[in-house]
Amino acid sequence: MKVGDKYRMWYVGFREARRAGGERGEERGHRDTCYAESADGVRWERPELGIVEADGSKANNLVMEADTGWNLCPFIDGHPDPLYPERYKAVSRVRSTITVDDRPVLRGFLSDDGLNWRMLDKDPIIVATPGYNPKLDSPISSFWDAVRGHYVAYYRGMAPPGIRAIRRSISTDFRNWSTPEYVDLGDSPLEELYMSACTPYFRAPDIYLSFPNRFVRERTVMTGAVRAGIAETCFMASRDGVHFSRHFMEAFIRPGMDQRNWHKHAMMVGTGVHETSPGELSIYYVENHGHPTCRIRRGALRTDGFTSVSTGYSGGEMVTRPFTFEGDHLVINFSTSVVGAVRVELQDREGRPLEGFAMDDCEEIFGDQIGRVVRWKGGDNVGAFENQPVKLRFAMTKEADLYSIKFRKAAR
C-alpha cells in the first residue's frame, strides 16, 4: 500500500526452513511476516524494527511470527466510525492446528502503525463452514469498502467436486462476519482458482479487481517437484463484489521461460494496485517459490491497462449496452498505431445517432493517451444527455486499443 509519500509492503519469509518427510513433503519452519518500505515503489529496503526475536536477535524486519498470524495482508481502515480505532487491520489465519470442531478459523488483527500488531481477541471472526475440505489458507484479501459501507474478506475454499475456489464474507463492525459464500463466476469454464488478490481499483472504487492463481493439478514440469501441479495468474473484475466477470480467460502473468516458475505456487500476486509514476501502475508477485532464488517481482503496466478492446489492421467496431452517465465530457484511454484511429458516436437507447454526435461528426483520434477528451464538430460537451439512456459506438481502424472510458465534469 502507499501511505503518504511511502510505499509499504508486508510479505512472508521462511527461516529454519526444512523439507518435511512423508508422501506430500513440504517446506516447514517459521513462516514470519516481514516488512519492507520504499520511496518510489521500485527500490525497497528492509528496516531493522526490533520487534520479533529471531535466532537470538531483534535486528531484523519481522513484525509477526507464524504462531501469531499467517500470510498477513494489512489494510488501512476507512470506516467513518470504526468499532476498533486502530488504523491498520487484517484478517489472517493462525496455526493450522487451531480449529473449531476441526474446522479452520480466521482471526482479526489490529495495529496503530502497521508494525506492532495485536490479535482482536482469542475467538475467531470467521469459521469454515462444514463440508468438503473446508480450507481457509492462502493470503486473505480484506478491506473496507467505502462505496458499499462494509468490510469484506476473500479467502480460499474447496468446492465440489474438490477444487480450489474463492469465498467471501462481509462485516459492518469487523467483529461479526457473514457466513462464507463462494463468489459467482457465471458460466465461465470450471477452473481451480487459488487465492484472489482482490482489491478496489483506486481510479474507480466501486470496481473490484482480482488476480487469482489458476491451478492445473494434472500437469507437472519440474522433476522432483514436492507437489504436483502448475499455476499462473489470471484477471477478473466485479461491480458488486459477488459476481465476477471472467470475460478475459487468457493468462495475465504466465510462468515464462524460467523453469523455476513452473510449479503450483507460481506467479502469485499480492494485494494492491498502485501508481508508481504518471501513466504507470505496478503490481507485485512472487517468482521461484520454494527455491533459494525466491523473490518478489514488480510488474508494470499502463494506467487501466488490465484489458483492452483491440483491433488489428483490418479494424472493427463496438457498441455498448444502454447506460446512463453523469458528467459533461467523455474521456477515453486509448492507443493507436501511426495509421490507426478511433472515432465515437453517441446514440439514443434504440441505437439512433444523436444529432451532432454521429460518427461522421467525431474528430479523428489517434496517438497514445490516458485521458483524451472526445470532440465532435459541435464541440465536446455532452452534458445535455446526462442521466438519459445512451449507447456508445466505437469505430477503430488499423491497429487500436481502447482501455477505458469515463465521463467527468469539465475542469474548472
Image (cartoon, rainbow, N blue to C red):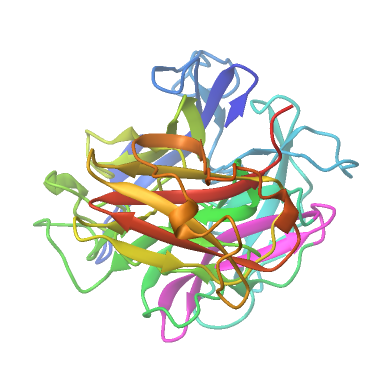
Q: Is residue 13 visible?
A: no
**The image quarter in which residue 303 lies:** top left
Which residue sits at x=28%, y=44%? 289
Rendered location of residue 314, percent (x, y):
20, 61
Q: Is residue 103 left or right of residue 237?
A: right
Q: Picture quarter containing residue 148?
A: bottom right
> Which residue is at a point 55% across and 59% down the rendered structure image?
97
Q: Residue at x 53, y 58 (%)?
A: 96
Q: Nearer the viewer, residue 26 or 267?
A: 267
Q: Looking at the image, is 393 positioned above or below residue 69?
A: below
Q: Would residue 145 be found to the left or right of residue 264 on screen?
A: right
Q: Quadrant of the C terminus?
A: top right
Q: Height in image: 232 above or below 166?
A: above
Front in this rendered view, residue 158 or 8: 8
Residue range corresponding to the magenta coloring: 149-176
Task: Give how far across and how far down residue 116 sits, in percent.
Answer: 68, 26
Residue 177 drawn at (x, y percent): 77, 63
On screen, 39 above or below 263? above
The residue most toward the bottom is 161
In the picture, the quarter occupied by the N terminus is top right
Looking at the image, which residue is at 57% across and 83% down? 131
Q: How many marks?
A: 0
**Is 155 contained in the magenta span?**
yes
Q: Work out which residue is located at the far left of the displayed protein and give it.
A: 223
Of 295 and 152, the residue lying toward us: 152
Which of these two is toward me, 216 or 129? 216
Query: Do we see residue 280 in this rendering?
Result: yes
